[in-house]
Image (tube, rainbow, N blue to C red):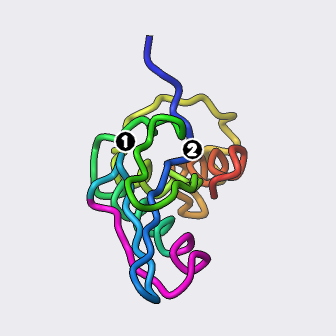
Amino acid sequence: MDKEIEFVMSYPVVIHQEDDMFWASVPDVSSAFTTGATVEEILVKIKEAIELALSTTLVVPEPTKFSEVDAEDGFVQMVTVSLIDYLRASSKAIRKNVTVPSYLSELAKKNGDNVSEILTKALEKRYGIG
């Protein structure tokens, strides 16, 4: 059975300090890393880096458990990311046959409405991702 897609995931981030700067890496997403002047700045930037990295791949890694991360000379912080951008980038349009009342079909045709686009927007709104 397929695993249900999770829209929000939390990844462990390893944060290091060198002199007056911080840098962070993500063990589960090797292409996501950043630097910053404060931990707060790092957390904002690494969240964006993770989301960007995942939006360009077809494989979303399972997050490592907090207790299993080796922080080496830094410390671990969990960062929650949204995978909506990833899902949009990696999904393709599929054909679905739907049934609508004939009067709505005629109104849509008369007004030049794209029923597929309207349905997509309605589903995104229903699931809180639009």
Tag 1 residue: 60
Q: Is residue 105 above or below residue 97?
A: below
Q: Which residue is drawn at 28% across and 44% down?
A: 58
Q: Which residue is drawn at 41% across and 67% down?
A: 24
Q: Quadrant of residue 52?
A: bottom left
Q: Is residue 123 above or below residue 121?
A: above
Q: Residue at x 27, y 50 (%)?
A: 57
Q: In this view, does 123 lie above or below 62?
A: below
Measured from the top left, where is residue 94 in percent x and y? 37, 37
Measured from the top left, where is residue 50 in percent x and y? 42, 60
Seen from the viewer's position, the closer of residues 62 and 57 is 62
Cβ atoms at labels 2 and 1 below 8 Å apart: no
The answer to whether residue 92 is left or right of residue 77 is left
Q: Which element is circle 2 on?
A: loop
Q: In this view, does 16 lie above or below 73?
A: below
Nearer-N-terminus badge (2/1): 2
Q: Distance between the residues labelled 2 and 1?
A: 11 Å
Q: Quadrant of residue 73?
A: bottom left
Seen from the viewer's position, the closer of residues 17 and 117 is 17
Measured from the top left, where is residue 67 in percent x and y? 53, 36
- Look at the image and say whether residue 43 sits in the magenta stretch: yes
For badge 1, the amino acid type reads Val
For badge 2, the amino acid type reads Phe
Which residue sits furthest top?
Answer: 1
Q: Residue 7 carries which label?
A: 2
Measured from the top left, where is residue 105 in percent x and y? 61, 44
The stretch in magenta equals 31-44
The quarter of the rendered structure image containing the N terminus is top left
Q: Which residue is drawn at 55% across and 30% down?
A: 98
Mark 1 neighbour class, 10 Å CA radius: few under 14, some 14 to 19, many 20 or more: some
